Image: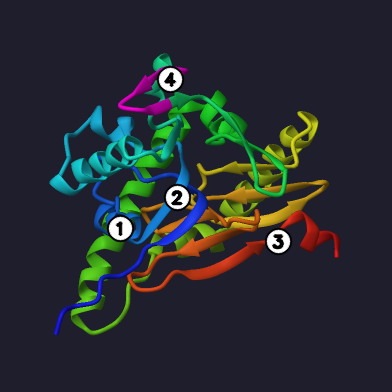
Amino acid sequence: MAQTETIPHHYRTIWLSDIHLGTRGCQADVLLDFLKNHTCDRLYLVGDIIDGWRLSSSLYWPQSHSNVLRRFLTLAKRGTEVVYVTGNHDEFLRRFSDHSFGNIRLVDRAVHRTADDRTLLVVHGDEYDVITRYHRWIAWLGDLGYQFLLEVNRVNNVIRERLGYGRWSLSAWVKHRVKRAVNFISEFEIAVARECEREGFDGVVCGHIHHAEIRDIGEVCYLNCGDWVESCTALVEGADGDIRVLHWHGEEPADLILLPTREERAA
């Protein structure tokens, strides 16, 4: 009996951020599975796709990481509009802003108009992170600590899987329970939303803090893609303009949060 081929979920727009190719924490195989099962008209890569910080100190680049880049290039070649918004870990690409490579357009920021006519600012978000902007050495130390947590987490998950338990993110658990980390996330979200409101946008899509979220802050919608190191999340826009956070766990996506259309919000 012939095996039935899975029909990909199609969306108007998909946003991905914080993939961190070039690090051991990157879940490239999970992302490739997601890209196999999801297609879109427009794909935004919202920064920290390639981790230049890690690659500058150690070379780690398995075949799966090349396959991710190849997949993006293939999508662009086949007609998907691919926009690469640079972040702080791939800031080495900012010198090429407003240029295209293999049909992928590099920008520092972008503006997206949803199907229901909302304008969204698309930025990585590092420019609203005080530590990254003004205390770069602290950011580097924080990144080293984060990489250590990810390595401990990797070993922990190997043991858990052998014992028959599911994957669990130690780094996410620490981040969401340590008071200073929680305060940092909240302050970051407010700073991004305020700038978005100041510039007259209806909402903002960003990444940077590895924390997927959709919520209203003041008069604007704040949307964060999450990451492909811990949570494996993406933002997706449907044909009518609704936006969801999807968590990909290998079979069917789990809808975490939904931003309704303009009409649904007004009802």
The answer to if 157 sits in the magenta stretch is: no
Residue on which the image places disc 2: 40
Q: Earlier in the sequence, mark 3 or mark 2?
A: 2
Q: Amino acid at mark 2?
A: Cys
Tell me the SS state at disc 3. Answer: loop
Nearest to the observer: residue 227 or residue 177: 227
Which numbered tag is attached to residue 175? none
Name the residue: 37% across, 63% down. Answer: 8
Residue on which the image places disc 1: 36
Q: Amino acid at mark 1?
A: Lys
Between circles 1 and 4, the one closer to the viewer is 1
Check contact, mark 1 vs mark 4: CB within 8 A. Answer: no
Q: Earlier in the sequence, mark 3 or mark 1?
A: 1
Nearest to the observer: residue 207 or residue 173: 207
Q: Earlier in the sequence, mark 2 or mark 4?
A: 2
Name the residue: 32% across, 78% down. Answer: 166
- Mark 2 neighbour class, 10 Å CA radius: few under 14, some 14 to 19, many 20 or more: many
Q: Classify residue 75 by image quadrant.
A: top left
Residue on which the image places disc 4: 94
Which numbered tag is attached to residue 260? 3
Q: Amino acid at mark 3?
A: Pro
Left-right relation of 120 to 4: right
User: How far, Cα to Cα, is label 3 from label 2?
Assistant: 19 Å
Name the residue: 52% across, 30% down. Answer: 132
For the C terminus, give its image quadrant. bottom right
Q: Which residues are magenta?
A: 97-105
Image position, residue 115 (x, y; %) = 65, 48
Image position, residue 42 (x, y; %) = 48, 42
User: How far, Cα to Cα, is label 1 from label 4?
Assistant: 29 Å
Check contact, mark 4 vs mark 3: CB within 8 A. Answer: no
- Mark 4 neighbour class, 10 Å CA radius: few under 14, some 14 to 19, many 20 or more: some
Q: Earlier in the sequence, mark 1 or mark 4?
A: 1
